[in-house]
Image (tube, rainbow, N blue to C red):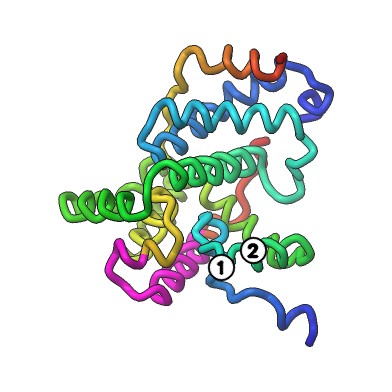
Amino acid sequence: MTADLRHPPPELLAACALDALPPSDGADVRTHMNSCAECRTEIDHFRAVLALISAEDAPPPPGLWSRIQAAINA
Amino acid sequence: MVEVCGRVEPALAEIYRRHGPALFGLARRVLCSEEGAAEVVQDVMVRLWSSPERFEPDRGTLRAYLQTQTHGLAVDLLRSETSRAERQRRWARAIAETPEAVEELVVQRAVEDRVCAAVTALTEDERAAITVAYYGGFTYAEAAVVLGQPEGTIKSRIRTGLRKLRATLAEPGDDA
């Protein structure tokens, strides 16, 4: 069996980009992604598109940056 | 990013200023909680500070990377705090009350014409499948239950929808 034949079904790559894989599929796809640049690129492209259409911007709470500063300086 | 790698706090502050509202908006949308969303955004920024090498610029923009992190953490938090049955009931109720909202949700931030055109080119079914899975934090199997469709149909709609969007929007510009 060649590496190509072990690619997950394309539908699972799309679902992976949405964090919508059930645990039964998720582990296999993630393992495959770690060693397959082609599938990783496919998922990256879907995620790039999602970044363009994602939810409405909302101002974070005023104190959040201070909390982040405290966390990184802890 | 070079500055963040060198642990320069103002560089992280600038990243937070530029991307924080988008990340907070996404996390709040998934979690329906200001506090939960703040927790997620804090976690994302601290992780970027601690492990900036995990962002690989050749794999996409910083925005896309941060949004992927934010979505993943928000979904994990949602799934740990709210049962699947409760989430499915909540979405089924929302869809029953305002069916058109499911198709509209995805375009909320689509201010650019080309993005708006790409989203409206999807079928309503494709938009609904993507919206319910992405913002509901559902697996495709759970989204199938919410939408009353077979799993295979939902998987296929998600893929077809994302491929159409990708074809229309092509390569996004580098806003990192």
Name the residue type under label 1.
Ser
10 Å crowding of disc 1: few (<14), some (14-19), many (20+): few
Please tell me whether residue B18 belongs to the stretch shown in magenta. no
Across and down, in percent, residue B26 comes to 46, 38
Indicate left or right for A4 with B72 as reference.
Answer: right
Q: Secondary structure at mark 1?
A: helix
Residue at 45% over, 70% down: B155
Choose between B143 and B26: the one closer to the eye: B143
The quarter holding residue B128 reads: bottom left
Start and end of the magenta stretch? B144-165
Indicate left or right for B78 with B55 as reference.
Answer: left
Choose between B42 and B175: the one closer to the eye: B42
Circle 2 residue? A27
Across and down, in percent, residue A39 comes to 69, 66
Residue at 68% over, 35% down: B176
Please tell me whether residue B149 belongs to the stretch shown in magenta. yes
Circle 1 residue? A24
Name the residue type under label 2.
Ala
The quarter holding residue B34 reads: top left
Indicate left or right for B173 with B146 as reference.
Answer: right
Q: Is residue A60 visible?
A: yes
Q: Are marks 2 and 1 on the same chain?
A: yes
Indicate left or right for B57 with B120 as reference.
Answer: right
Which quarter of the rendered picture does the N terminus of chain B lie within? Answer: top right
Q: Secondary structure at mark 2?
A: helix
